[in-house]
């Protein structure tokens, strides 16, 4: 496998003889929305991976699982995959979650960390005992602490997947580490500067290869995601490489400011660690041409009962601690500044692209 070049292109061929009914999965990138094909046969082959995920997460075969992800295609994929291992699954749009909780009475809920923070499900938890978080935004310790405080009686785990693959790639064990699937897929954690294995304790690129025949096979596909490789074995007893559950984000979308890369995962983690911040937060990087220097602006909305000026100071101090420089922090959202949990780099974009990003 090491002799095959790592690729990042998005035009892997679809094999028409794969059969089983081909459907598409949306995968948003910086330039466009791409579609990845998978089939019923792929889901059949991926059953061991779903069983692996269910075993580590603690989802029994008879579990009632509610899936509420923002991507409708991901909802359908999760529903089919979990049904393959015997679960009773219902997938709904995010805006229907609160109403559906009381009617469906799930034992497991799969949503994004941001959705878990935004929803108020305390009156409709019913028999829910497991909350599975998936998605790269806000999956670190800071937001996790807020979610656990909100739902102290729930077990909280994380699941890592990509739109390009028809099953989970990593799941969180009881000791808080991500363990990677090995049945039917080969996951490599490679160094940032070359295609050698990343050393324990370092940051790594997630590179995926299909082992089984699929409708759209991946061969050393660089997902663009970066993770932190953990050193040493895991106390849960599982072997193999493991990673911190905080996915750093896409390398291509991490701007360099004053010599420091602003990965979206660390950016969000720094802001969520400040008490008094709501989910309306965003960060822009611009070139201040008048002073010939980069300008990082953090906009946020404080929670009720918190002094905005004190929260501003906490954000600035935390940002300096994490990245080594002070940002501009404000509660005044300019017209083009939407509160999204990511860093957007406007320095080298054309006016037309800037307008597109600002309205996305």
Image (spheres, rainbow, N blue to C red):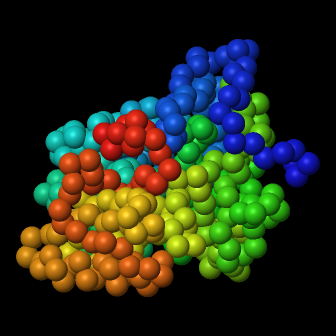
Query: Which residue is at a point 46% across and 61% down the rendered structure image?
Result: 264
Q: Nearer the viewer, residue 130 or 290?
A: 290
Measured as percent of width and height from the top left, residue 229 is found at 66, 70
Measured as percent of width and height from the top left, residue 19 is found at 67, 16
Q: Residue furthest left?
A: 305
Query: Which residue is at a point 76% across and 36% down the rendered structure image?
Result: 212
Q: In the rendered view, does 217 fall on the left or right side of 24?
A: right
Q: Quadrant of residue 300?
A: bottom left
Q: In the rendered view, does 71 fall on the left or right side of 58?
A: left
Q: Nearer the viewer, residue 75 or 317?
A: 317
Q: Quadrant of residue 150?
A: bottom left
| Total numbered badges shown on the rendered structure | 0
Up-down relation of residue 260 to residue 338 (above or below): below
Up-down relation of residue 276 to residue 171 (above or below): below
Q: Residue furthest front?
A: 290
Query: Which residue is at a point 52% across and 73% down the rendered structure image?
Result: 258
Q: Quadrant of residue 122?
A: bottom left
Q: Determine if residue 189 is in view.
A: yes
Q: Nearer the viewer, residue 103 or 324?
A: 324
Measured as percent of width and height from the top left, residue 246 is found at 50, 66
Name the quarter where the C terminus is drawn.
top left
Query: Which residue is at a point 32% across and 59% down the rendered structure image?
Result: 282
Q: Determine if residue 145 is in view.
A: no
Q: In the rendered view, does 13 fall on the left or right side of 109?
A: right
Q: In the rendered view, does 121 fall on the left or right side of 161?
A: left
Measured as percent of width and height from the top left, residue 164 is found at 60, 38
């Amino acid at each position: 496998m090491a002799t095959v070049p790592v690729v990042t292109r998005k035009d892997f061929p679809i094999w028409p003889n794969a059969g089983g009914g081909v459907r598409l999965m949306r995968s948003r990138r910086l330039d466009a929305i791409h579609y990845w094909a998978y089939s019923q046969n792929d889901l059949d082959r991926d059953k061991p991976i779903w069983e692996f995920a269910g075993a580590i997460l603690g989802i029994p075969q008879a579990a009632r699982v509610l899936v509420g992800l923002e991507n409708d295609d991901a909802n359908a994929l999760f529903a089919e995959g979990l049904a393959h291992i015997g679960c009773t699954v219902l997938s709904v749009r995010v805006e229907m979650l609160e109403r559906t909780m009381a009617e469906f009475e799930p034992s497991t809920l799969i949503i994004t960390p941001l959705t878990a923070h935004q929803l108020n499900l305390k009156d409709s938890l019913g028999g829910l005992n497991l909350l599975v978080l998936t998605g790269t935004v806000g999956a670190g310790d800071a937001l996790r602490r807020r979610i656990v405080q909100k739902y102290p009686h729930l077990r909280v785990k994380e699941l890592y997947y990509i739109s390009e693959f028809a099953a989970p790639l990593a799941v969180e064990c009881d000791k808080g580490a991500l363990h990677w699937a090995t049945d039917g897929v080969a996951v490599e954690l490679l160094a940032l500067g070359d295609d050698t294995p990343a050393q324990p304790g370092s940051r790594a690129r997630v590179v995926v290869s299909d082992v089984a025949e699929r409708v759209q096979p991946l061969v050393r596909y660089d997902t663009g995601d970066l993770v932190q490789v953990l050193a040493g074995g895991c106390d849960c007893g599982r072997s193999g490489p493991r990673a911190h559950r905080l996915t750093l984000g896409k390398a291509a979308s991490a701007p360099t400011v004053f010599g420091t890369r602003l990965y979206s995962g660390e950016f969000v983690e720094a802001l969520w660690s400040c008490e008094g911040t709501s989910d309306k937060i965003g960060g822009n990087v611009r070139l201040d041409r008048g002073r010939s220097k980069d300008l990082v602006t953090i906009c946020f909305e404080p929670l009720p009962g918190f002094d905005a000026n004190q929260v501003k100071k906490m954000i600035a101090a935390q940002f300096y601690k994490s990245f080594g420089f002070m940002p501009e922090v404000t509660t005044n959202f300019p017209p083009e500044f939407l509160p999204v949990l990511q860093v957007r780099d406007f320095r080298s974009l054309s006016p037309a692209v800037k307008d597109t990003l600002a309205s996305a």
